[in-house]
Image (cartoon, rainbow, N blue to C red):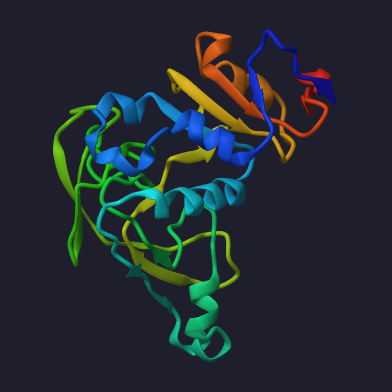
Amino acid sequence: MITIPDNLCTVVFTLQELISKIYPDIAHIHDKPMEWLCERAILTPKNDQAAAINDILLPSLEGEEMVYTSIDFVVNTDDAINHPVEFLNSLKPSGLPHYNLIPRVGTSVMLLRNLKPPQLCNGTSLNVKALHRNVVEAPIITGFEQGETVFVPRIPFIPNNLPFEFKRIEFPLKVCFTITINKSQGQTLKIAGVDLRENCFSHGQFYVTCSRVSSPSSLIILARSGRLAKNVVYKEVL
């Protein structure tokens, strides 16, 4: 464990403090310029942390909400009796959208698949403009053709890390106000918040976190009491 020094960042001790510093006045996000959205993010070591914070942020938006549910089924019908739909709905394989997607107008979302490279690639961020029954309308906020409005359809997903074949048809999107530290690699942010209530778990993760911004004043860390953080370093790879 290391003690986070004063000159590295600003340290806060509640999640609400972290959210208010990174996303002030988020209720009126529709009034913010596109640059405001793409220059900030909250980072976490783990996916479930990111999802939990996104779930807290979403109700703060004033835009229209839509509930999208996926279509889940096993590819081999002989397996259907062993894998009921309710079980399939509960699965959250890495890289797949969840069974329920509940965005609001104004939500920042990230693509989970390459749809039309180089314009629409895995990791491209969009801002939801309108929610239709069969497509999500959203301008691109990062990457190629920034500002162009696109229409994202539902697509099929078949995860390869399960002992049976199952297909999920859903929008290839996930909310990205908060993302994992690993997913942020390659990005430069004007302001970044980091939730370190859960420790970093892989080599260099803490360094990646601190290098997302260009100055200490732009880095806000939610730390455990005592300003402690785990910096994982494998000496054999140095």
Instruction: Please tell me which residue is depicted at 80% across the width and 32% down the height of the picture.
Output: 225
Residue depicted at x 33% and y 46%: 107
Q: Which residue shows up at 58% across the image and 34% down it?
A: 17
**Nearest the eye: 172 or 128:** 128
Image quadrant where one finds the N terminus? top right
Q: Which of 203 and 136 is in front in this view?
A: 136
Where does the C terminus fall, quadrant-wise?
A: top right
Q: Is residue 11 visible?
A: yes
Residue 199 left/right relative to 205: right
Instruction: Tell me what residue is drawn at x 42 percent, y 67 percent.
Output: 100
Is residue 188 something that shows in the picture? Answer: no
58 relative to 46 in the view: left or right: left
Image height of 144 relative to 180, above or below: above
> At which x and y percent is residue 133?
19, 67
Q: Is residue 130 above or below residue 123?
A: below
Q: Position of residue 27 (x, y in %)?
A: 34, 44
Rendered image quadrant of residue 39: top left
- The residue lying toward the viewer, choosing from 6 and 135, is 6
Furthest-bottom residue in view?
A: 81
Which residue is nearer to you in this view: 45 or 13?
13
Which quadrant of the structure image shows residue 230? Answer: top right
Q: Position of residue 12 (x, y in %)?
A: 65, 28
Instruction: Give x and y (percent) for residue 101.
Output: 38, 62
Number of dots carrying numbers: 0
- Rendered view: 184 above or below 16: above
